[in-house]
Image (tube, grey):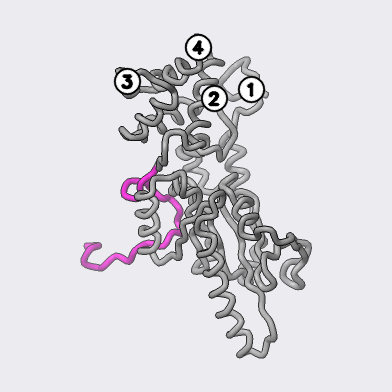
Amino acid sequence: MQCAGTPGSDRADCGYNSAVAQQASRKPVFPPEIAPYIDVGAYLVDSRAVAATLYLDPLLKGKELILLTRSKQSDGQATRRWKNFFLELGYHVIVIDSVAGEGLEEVLDYLANLLQRKLKVAKKLGISNATLRVVALGVPNVGKSTFLNRLIGQKRLKTGDIPGITRGRQWVRIFDDVEVLDTAGVLRDPEQINRRKPFWMLLNLMPYDYTLREQSVELLRSRLDRQAWLKLRRYYKVPDELEQPGDFWEMLEVVARYGGYTLKNDDLVDKAARRLMKDFRMGRFGRISLEQPETAVITSPFLNRPAVDDEDAM
């Protein structure tokens, strides 16, 4: 498999090209006809890069539950500001970490309250029972399956067809009256895909693409504050006198020096870049957020926008 623009290369994980990403972005997430029967659109968003991983579906307007995932790996203050950002726009937001189990009880309480409300309405209409239907959405590899598995816990996984509205589709029953439709990763907003790729690769949301390594490493390097650099330095056993790296090459030279090699060829540059990104994802350098709500740009046209006063618009 050859990567575009790299004659003679033979790499099995060149990553997404723009044509594939755009094609994937047009695929429907679920049949539009079942949207009216869905009660909650649970959007899993990586709290380390919220703008780069946010997906909103216009068919589920007003049913959004924003789940800021991997909270144990993001900067706590930044995550709180992101939560407030969405709250101020009128969304319900819960901060979770599926591995640690953080926030899952709050999610269950939220679903239980919605179910009780739906049951009351159903009773008034003479319906003896009702089911709360949730769809889990997010970009590829954002952690939907891990989240659902933790939500189910040790209970036996039950699946089945819902009569009428879900012919041929499998749902996961997490409680007697709550069912979740798991979905494949969603790619949208094709014009912004190239801008997001360095974030996605750094977060392991897409295959490794060596053409993006410099952008991804630079992205991480630029987000290392003094505390993160000190943790990185201790982890890689960097001498105290070594200053914080000022560019891509200096950053990878730190990793290579720790590994006992020099960046004498492209494969070793790849080796250092992969190691650095993996260690970041493992939390070796502390809790790091790649985006801040004050500066990140959310391009989704379906995001609730604050109303603009006529006077402000003049």
Q: Which badge, 2 or 1, comes first in the chain's sequence?
A: 1
Q: Which badge, 3 or 1, comes first in the chain's sequence?
A: 1
Quarter the N terminus occupies: top right
Residue 11, disc: 1
Which amino acid type corresponds to the residue marked 4 in the rendered image?
A: Tyr
Q: Is residue 309 magenta?
A: yes
Task: State the image coordinates of residue 242 (x, y, percent, origin top left).
Answer: 32, 18
The span picked out in magenta is: 291-314
Q: Which badge, 3 or 2, comes first in the chain's sequence?
A: 2
Q: Is residue 286 magenta?
A: no
How far is mark 2 from mark 4, CA to CA?
19 Å
Q: Answer with left or right where residue 28 lies relative to residue 215.
A: right
Q: Which badge, 4 or 3, comes first in the chain's sequence?
A: 3
How far is mark 3 from mark 1, CA to CA?
37 Å
Task: State the image coordinates of residue 102 (x, y, percent, origin top left).
Answer: 50, 55
Task: State the image coordinates of residue 202 (x, y, percent, origin top left).
Answer: 49, 35
Nearer mark to the viewer, of 2 and 4: 4
